[in-house]
């Protein structure tokens, strides 16, 4: 039995891309990773378009809400993934060494649902394999 790796998906507002990344990683890499997300300046709520796009993909949105990155500073994180340039630049220093990768995505906030769906597809196509490679996870 493999110990699940903890992945922190980091963005600025933690309302779109990082939330979608958290949900998709937990869905596509279930049993291998536990993904959480946070923001350097979290918004009050997850964007409705992000929730709707995830639901259309058949991905659970249960438990998604914006969280500050400080909430995870004392958590044992195996990998930090920044999904926007601003979060990459302002990512805090964690108390213990942690691997980091940067996989940027378009911000669909305020755009039509089709943009959220396109970003979800992009996250699935690029983020899932990048996390798999960074953590040395084998295909099932």
Image (cartoon, helix red, strand yellow):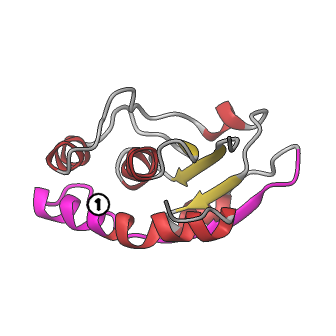
User: Is 29 displayed left or right of 52 in the figure?
Assistant: right
Q: Identify the secondary structure beneath mark 1.
A: helix
Residue 112 visible, this angle:
no
x and y, in percent, of residue 26 in the image: 45, 44
Quarter of the picture holding the N terminus: top right
Q: In the rendered view, would you say 31 is above or below 18?
A: above
Q: Nearer the viewer, residue 78 or 106?
A: 78
Sort mark 1 into few (<14), some (14-19) or many (20+) by Cα contacts within 10 Å.
many
Residue 20 lies, in percent from the top left, at 36, 50
Q: Where's residue 126, x and y in %?
A: 43, 73
> Which residue is depicted at the point 61% across and 49% down?
7
Return the residue at label 1.
Answer: 120
Q: Residue furthest right?
A: 96
Side of 69 relative to 124 (left or right): right
In this rendering, position of residue 133 left or right of residue 49: right
| Of residues 81 and 14, the one drawn nearer to the viewer in this rendering | 81
Determine the residue positioned at 19% across, 42% down.
55
Magenta part of the chain: 96-121
Q: Residue at x 24, y 47 (%)?
A: 54
- Against 4, residue 121 (above or below) is below
Residue 33 magenta-drawn? no
């Amino acid at each position: 039995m493999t110990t699940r790796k903890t992945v922190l998906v980091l963005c600025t507002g933690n309302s779109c891309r990082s939330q979608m990344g958290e949900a998709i990683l937990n869905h596509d890499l279930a049993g291998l990773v536990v993904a959480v997300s946070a923001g350097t300046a979290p918004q009050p709520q997850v964007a409705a378009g992000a929730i709707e796009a995830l639901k259309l993909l058949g991905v659970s949105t249960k438990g998604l809400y914006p969280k500050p990155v400080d909430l995870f500073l004392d958590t044992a994180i195996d990998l930090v993934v920044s999904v926007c340039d601003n979060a990459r630049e302002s990512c805090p220093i964690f108390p213990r060494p942690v691997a980091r990768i940067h996989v940027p995505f378009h911000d669909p906030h305020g755009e039509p649902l089709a943009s959220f769906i396109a970003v979800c597809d992009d996250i699935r196509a690029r983020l899932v394999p990048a996390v798999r490679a960074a953590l040395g996870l084998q295909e099932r």
